Structures are given as C-alpha cells and as structure tokens.
C-alpha cells in the first residue's frame, strides 16, 4: 500500500489479475476466443454509512467470454475522492501496453480491445477532466450551452453540434474542459467510448425524478393525492406474487421510493409502471410516461434495438419535448437531456445493456463486503482479493435452461410466437402447456403493445398442448387482470448480475 492522490492505493496489475481469473476458468470457455474485449468502470463506493470513507476501484470486465469476469486493476481508499487522477496512471499504462502488444496466456497470443469506459455522470466528468453536468457546457455528448433556471437545464432536443474525438482532444470548446485526462494516452474515442450509463442516468435519474415529481412536486402540477399514492402502492404490492425469480427484488410501496434500488426502478419502467399507474395518473402524465417506457423497452432489447432505434429516438425526443410542456423548462436537467443521445449508444454497442454499469455495481458490493471493521479497510480489501487469486477452484457457469411448472415462473413465449404456461412435465424434453390464442393489444399508444411482445388474452382462450423444451424460447412475466391474462417477455439482459 502507498499514498497516491492523497488516498491509500494498491495496484494489482492488469496482466496479473487477468491471468489469475483466466486460470480459474474452464478450458472450453477460451477455445474459440482470439481476443479479449474489456469494459472499464471507475466509481466511488462508500464503505460505511457512518463515515465518508469510500473506495475508488478501477474495475475491468472481460465481456466476450462466459462466465463474465470482473476484477480490480487497482483500488484507492480514502475519506474523500482522490484529489487528482494520478491513481489512474498505472492502470492506464497497463491498458496501453495490452492494447498495443496484446496478452499471452498459456502460450497463446490474444489481442486486447477496450470496448468502453462506464461511469456515472459525476465520475465520468472527473476522469475525463471536464465540467460537471451542472456546468454551462456540461453535456459530454453535445456542445450546447446550458440554461440556468435554479438548476442547469439543456433545452435543445435537436439541431445541436455533437462532440467528436478530434474536437475533444483539440479542446475545441475550452469551456468544457478542466484539464488533460490520462485517458487521452489511450487509442480510444474520448466521446463514443464513454457511453451514457442508463442504470444511473435513466433509472436512478429520470425515472426516480418522475416519481418524486408525482408524489412530492408542486401542488396542482400533476401531483398525486395521498389516496392516489396509496392506490399505486397497493397496485404494486398486488403484483408481488407475479414476479418471477429472475428479478432480485419484488415491488415496494411508493412511500419507500428513497430506498428503491436501480433494479426496482428498471422493473417499474419496463414492466410494472404501465399497470399500476393506469387510471390513477392523469392522462397527459401517463401518456408521457408510456412514451418513455416504450422507448427504453426497445433500446434495452437486443432483438428490437437495431430495427426500431430510430422510432425509439423519435419517442425520446417527444418525451423530452412534452416534459418541457407539462413539467416546465426546469425539468430538462442533464439526465433528461441525455435521453436524446441514447440512440448513438445503441448504434455503437447494440443495446443499452451492453454499456451499462449493472455487473460492476454488483461486484462493487462484493468488494464492500470484504471490509469487516474500520481499521485499515484498504488492506482488508487487498488481502481478500489476493487470497481469492490463490483459489484453485474453477468458475462454474451454467445457463439456466430449467423449465418451471409452478407460478410465477412458468410463463413462456414459444418459438412460434405464441405464449403459454407450462403446467407439468410429460417427458424429459416435453411439457404439457396451456397455450393461449387470439392475442389483443395491451395498449395502443404510443404504439401497438404487440410490437414489444406485450400481449393480452382472454383467460379462457387457450388449448392444452405438448411443447418441446427447445421451443420454450423466452421467459415471461404473466399478470392477471380481471378476465384477462397478460404476458410480457423479459426484455433486458438477465445474464448480468443485478443490484
């Protein structure tokens, strides 16, 4: 351990950590791999609730092999964030060498590619040496000047100049920069390779901001009454028995919104919000929420994002524009403005889950659990990580292809496009299923819900059929609504660890 940037610092080394992790993987996992694709994450993690002590690890993830490997390259621990970026220098030097020379493991040469650097907005501005989102030139994707209305807002939703790697490295807009980032030493795109993290900026940013506006905003400005808040909370609670095992958390009351985690906000945005808000939230606000929900449903789905990304972009522009009308100009803060830039991330990475912080946030909690007392917390983390490196056990990774026959885990989409409930096992590879027919649209605005795969059926419109295991292709959520059964395919990537 040594002091760097006024914090306790330890450098594990990229080659060292990657070698240890690969040695613990089954040999077949690397058979067809020619290169390692890395994603990087830098963020602060408070270690104790009672003090300001926090850890700032530089985490790396090998994204193109399974099981997904996450490990720290270096770690800094102090009572505040590092005073400068010197704690990144050694990690960036390791990356620079790996990108230029590749990596040798078991006498096999691999190339190394840095896919992206994933950070929330404050950490991104910190490591790039740029103005924070609260500054007049704080947007890291476009060059527009913010407008201050008690907070910094970004009113333009189109026709703005986009930043480029060249303009960033040439500091073409000096008001955006605070210094020279050590990341400029790497052969990466300083704009496109620092994506918008929808976990922080959409789920924890926009969705939570909307809910807080509804329950605590100005009276008469779309604010919900106590009775309406209680009704939505009751609706959320009623859905708890319908949530399958893929979800780490069940729905909680709106009164607990300050303690909701990012996965709960994602669940509300993609799946449950459309049900619990219907006929409670007034139409302009509900329709505006549905525009956001449908757009993000498209962009998180690898199947839909490529084909419908332009339509999703139009929806997000419409959402931001309507927010200005119904919530006021002061609502267009950086997180809301960032929605109009999400299309670019999908075009580069495929879908939003490919450039989100979910797996890193989960690993951050495992680092936090390595600290058992307040004495030398940095040393505790380092020792536990080094001990894990000496472990000879292999990673176990199995796709969960088990077929469930009990609620709420027995809803599936069939290869033919129909939906069913598995009722009982017939043979090892076949199941008796309740197959529904004559689908109806769950909603028609802003688009027909069946475009997303969200379908509604009369409870009695089904036939019992034997379905092969291989034809049960996608897990679903199934809700009961009066005389209707509703199926929602699980859209986002559950192979990532949830927080």
Image (cartoon, rainbow, N blue to C red):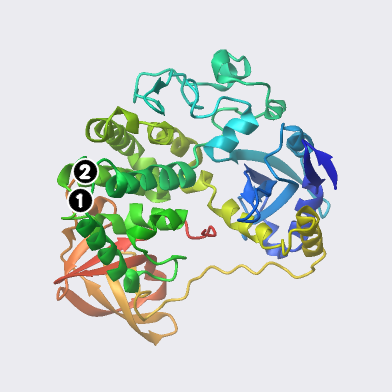
- Residue position marked by numbered label 1 in the rendering: 281
Image point (72%, 68%), residue name: 394
151 in relation to 221, above or below: above
Left or right: 208 in relation to 192? left
Of residues 424 and 465, the one drawn nearer to the viewer in this rendering: 424
Classify mark 2: helix, strand or loop.
loop
Q: Are marks 2 and 1 in contact (CB under 8 Å)?
A: yes
Which residue position is annotated with label 2?
A: 222
Residue 402 appears in view = yes
Graded by Cα atoms within 10 Å as few (under 14), some (14 to 19) or many (20 or more), the crowding at tag 2 reads some
Of the residues under marks 2 and 1, which one precedes in the sequence? Answer: 2
Residue drawn at (18%, 62%), measured in percent from left and top? 439
State the mark number for residue 457: none
- Give how far apart the Cα atoms at labels 2 and 1 are: 8 Å
Which x, y percent locates residue 87? 76, 37
Q: Is residue 21 above or below residue 311?
A: below
Q: How many marks?
A: 2
Position of residue 147 measured from the top left corner of the image (x, y, whole percent): 39, 21
Camera-near label (2 vs 1) is 2
């Amino acid at each position: 351990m040594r002091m760097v940037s006024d914090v306790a610092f330890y450098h594990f080394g990229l080659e060292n950590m990657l070698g240890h992790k690969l040695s613990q993987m089954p040999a077949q996992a690397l058979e067809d791999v020619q290169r390692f694709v890395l994603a990087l994450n830098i963020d602060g993690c408070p270690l104790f609730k009672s003090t300001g002590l926090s850890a700032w690890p530089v985490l790396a993830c090998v994204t193109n092999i399974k099981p997904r490997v996450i490990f720290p390259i270096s770690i800094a621990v102090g009572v505040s964030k590092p005073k400068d970026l010197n704690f990144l220098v050694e990690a960036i030097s390791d990356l620079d060498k790996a990108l230029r020379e590749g990596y040798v493991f078991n006498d096999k040469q691999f190339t190394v590619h840095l896919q992206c650097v994933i950070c929330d907005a404050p950490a991104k501005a910190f490591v790039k040496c740029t103005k924070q989102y609260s500054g007049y030139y704080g947007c890291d994707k476009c060059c527009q000047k913010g407008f201050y209305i008690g907070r910094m807002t970004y009113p333009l939703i189109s026709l703005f100049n986009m930043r480029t790697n060249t303009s960033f490295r040439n500091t073409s807009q000096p008001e955006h920069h605070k210094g020279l980032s050590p990341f400029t030493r790497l052969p990466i795109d300083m704009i496109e390779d620092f994506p918008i993290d929808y976990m922080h900026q959409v789920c924890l940013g926009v969705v939570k901001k909307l809910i807080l506006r509804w329950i605590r905003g100005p009276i008469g400005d779309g604010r919900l009454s106590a009775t309406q808040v209680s009704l939505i909370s009751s609706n959320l609670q009623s859905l708890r028995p319908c949530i399958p095992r893929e979800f780490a958390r069940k729905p909680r009351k709106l009164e607990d919104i300050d303690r909701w985690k990012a996965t709960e906000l994602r669940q509300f945005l993609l799946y449950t919000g459309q049900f619990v808000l219907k006929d409670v939230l007034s139409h302009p606000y509900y329709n505006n929420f549905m525009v956001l929900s449908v757009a993000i449903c498209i962009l998180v789905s690898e199947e839909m994002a490529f084909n419908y990304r332009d339509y999703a972009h139009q929806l997000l522009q419409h959402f931001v524009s309507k927010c200005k009308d119904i919530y006021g100009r002061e609502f267009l803060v950086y997180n809301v403005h960032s929605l109009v830039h999400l299309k670019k991330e999908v075009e580069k990475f495929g879908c939003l889950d490919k450039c989100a912080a979910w797996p890193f946030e989960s690993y951050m909690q495992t680092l936090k659990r390595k600290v058992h007392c307040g004495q030398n917390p940095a040393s505790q983390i380092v020792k536990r990580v080094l001990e894990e490196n000496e472990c000879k056990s292999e990673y176990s990774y199995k796709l969960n292809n088990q077929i469930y026959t009990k609620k709420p885990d027995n809803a599936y989409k069939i290869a033919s496009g129909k939906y069913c409930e598995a009722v009982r096992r017939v043979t090892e590879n076949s199941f008796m299923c309740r197959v529904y027919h004559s689908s109806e649209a769950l909603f028609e605005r802003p688009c027909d819900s069946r475009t997303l795969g969200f379908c509604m059926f009369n409870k009695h419109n089904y036939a019992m059929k034997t379905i092969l295991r291989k034809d049960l292709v996608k897990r679903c959520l199934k809700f009961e609504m009066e005389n209707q059964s509703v199926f929602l395919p699980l859209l986002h990537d559950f192979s990532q660890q949830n927080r």
